[in-house]
Image: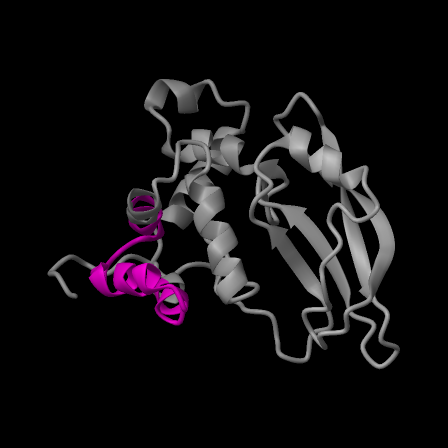
Amino acid sequence: MTDDRSPPPEAEACLNCPYPSSQKGGTLIAEHVTSLKEHERLVGRPDGYRPKECKRCDCPSVHIHAYRERVLAAESAKVTTIVCFRCSNPECGAVWRVLPALLARCLWRSWQVVETATMAGASAAASSPVPKRTRRRWKQRLRTAACPLLMALATSTVAVMQQLAGSMVDAASRLELVVAHAGVTGGSDGLRLASLASLIHLIAPGIRVM
């Protein structure tokens, strides 16, 4: 679809950069983990976050490689722990960080905090503990072109995602896509960004919503 609006600005390169095919490992997102309580419960279990297989070579054996702290700025809990796994195949050795869907990759905050700062009403956003400069930068990112995200959705094996991609205008912004995706999936407030971000990373690892 097309319309006569001016196209939105292009996003920063870091948002549209997929993982290179030669990369060993990366970040896996646990789409079903949307609460800090559930995340910490899984971290405390040896197999809580263990992938069924290496996503690079399909080796069925991956072992815990490290536990790392992840900053949770603007939260009562300032840090949380994430688990890293290494493939047991000596010819592969890929290391995978497993991130719960509630955490915004590369933003050092939960998606709920990010969503409140960027998509909530003026009064809620104004009371956000996120600095104004950071909120402004995030909002600018959401105003950029959604084209790379739409291209990813168009390759999805889920028909409704293909239809969503085809229904969006060429001049759609990332924010418009977030809202449209939530409308299709029934995403609730606080999880709209998280839901789309997890899906995009699953289809095109490395591509970011913001």
Of 150 and 133, nearer the camera is: 150
Percent coordinates x, y for residue 63 in the rendering: 85, 59
Observer able to see residue 180: yes
Residue range of the region highlighted in magenta in the rendering: 150-179
Q: Residue at x 46, y 46 (%)?
A: 195
Q: Residue at x 73, y 68 (%)?
A: 54
Percent coordinates x, y for residue 138 in the rendering: 46, 42
Q: Residue at x 46, y 18 (%)?
A: 127
Q: Is residue 97 above or below residue 170?
A: above
**Direction from residue 46 to residue 207 in the image, left or right:** left
Q: Is residue 13 above or below residue 59?
A: above
**Direction from residue 82 to residue 76 in the image, left or right:** left
Of 62 and 194, nearer the camera is: 62
Image quarter of the N terminus: bottom left
> What secondary structure is the magenta-colored segment mainly?
helix
Name, please, the residue furthest toward the left.
4
**Direction from residue 48 to residue 179 in the image, left or right:** left
Percent coordinates x, y for residue 143 in the rendering: 34, 49
Q: Residue at x 54, y 28 (%)?
A: 130
Label count reads: 0
Observer able to see residue 207: no
Percent coordinates x, y for residue 103 in the rendering: 60, 41
Q: Is residue 110 above or below residue 166?
A: above
Residue 155: say if magenta: yes
Instruction: Say which quarter of the image contains residue 205.
Output: bottom right
Residue 111: say if magenta: no
